[in-house]
Image (cartoon, grey):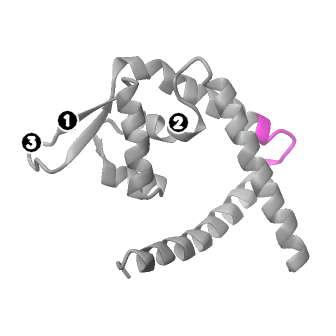
Amino acid sequence: MEGHFSNLGRCISILDRLMKMYYDHGLSEFEIGWGQQFYVEYLYDHPGASAQEMVECIRVDKATLTKAIKKLTEIGYVRMVRNEADRRVKQLYLTDKAIPAARQIKKIHGKFYETLCSGISPEEIRQTETILEKTMENLNQKVWHRMEEHHGEA
């Protein structure tokens, strides 16, 4: 088992770096890159989402989300609107300026998936996705549990 971890970890690390490079290159004409594309896409698909919804779906901590939304607001990609029913909640929307970037993200997703899965059977892709989802959940439980303990929430 020990010999497999270093290769698995190395592969995940390389995939992560290559994905960042792929997306950064594909989004170079916009003012965003890998780090912000998740939030732009989420708001494109879920206009009016709250920060809490995004934290739960994207699985980032509130500080990371706040930093990303701040940048997207500063470059004119996101606007915040107070919820009329609950004035404490801010709903997030993409601006017209962000729509071309969101559409480019969707195109990049398609091309990336096509490249990533080239030469791999649909069954192998399903198996890989299932395994990655399980490993992601295993790690997610451990990481978030530790974060909650660190912040006194557990």
- Residue tagged by mark 3? 84
- Check contact, mark 1 vs mark 3: CB within 8 A: no
Question: 69 above or below 151?
Answer: above
The quadrant in which residue 33 appears is top right
Q: Is residue 94 something that shows in the picture?
A: yes
Chain part drawn in magenta: 115-123
Side of 94 relative to 145 (left or right): left
Amino acid type at image mark 2: Gln
Q: Counting other residues with Cα less than 10 Å from the Cα at mark 3, is it few (<14), some (14-19), or many (20 or more)? A: few
Q: Is residue 67 magenta?
A: no
Type of amino acid at the residue the image marks with label 1: Val
**SS for callout 2:** helix
Check the image and report above or below for 137 versus 38. below
Label drawn at residue 81: 1
Identify which residue is drawn at 15% across, 43% down: 83
Q: Is residue 152 left or right of residue 86?
A: right
Give whichever of discs 1 and 2 has the lower sequence position.
2
Going 38% across and 74% down the picture, which residue do you hit? 151
The percent coordinates of residue 126 (x first, y second) are 71, 55
Tell me the distance, in whole angstroms, between the alpha carbons under discs 1 and 3: 9 Å
Let me know if residue 123 appears in the view.
Answer: no
x and y percentages locating residue 66 in the rendered image: 37, 47
Q: Quadrant of the C terminus?
A: bottom left
- Please state which of residues 116 and 142 is positioned toward the viewer in this rendering: 142
Q: Indicate the amino acid at tag 3.
A: Glu
106 with respect to 44 (left or right): right
Residue 12, compared with residue 94, is above or below; it is: below
Rendering quarter of residue 63:
bottom left
Q: CA distance from mark 2 to mark 3?
A: 28 Å
Residue beneath disc 2: 37
Looking at the rendered image, the quarter that the N terminus falls into is bottom right
Disc 1 and disc 2: Cα gap in Å?
A: 21 Å
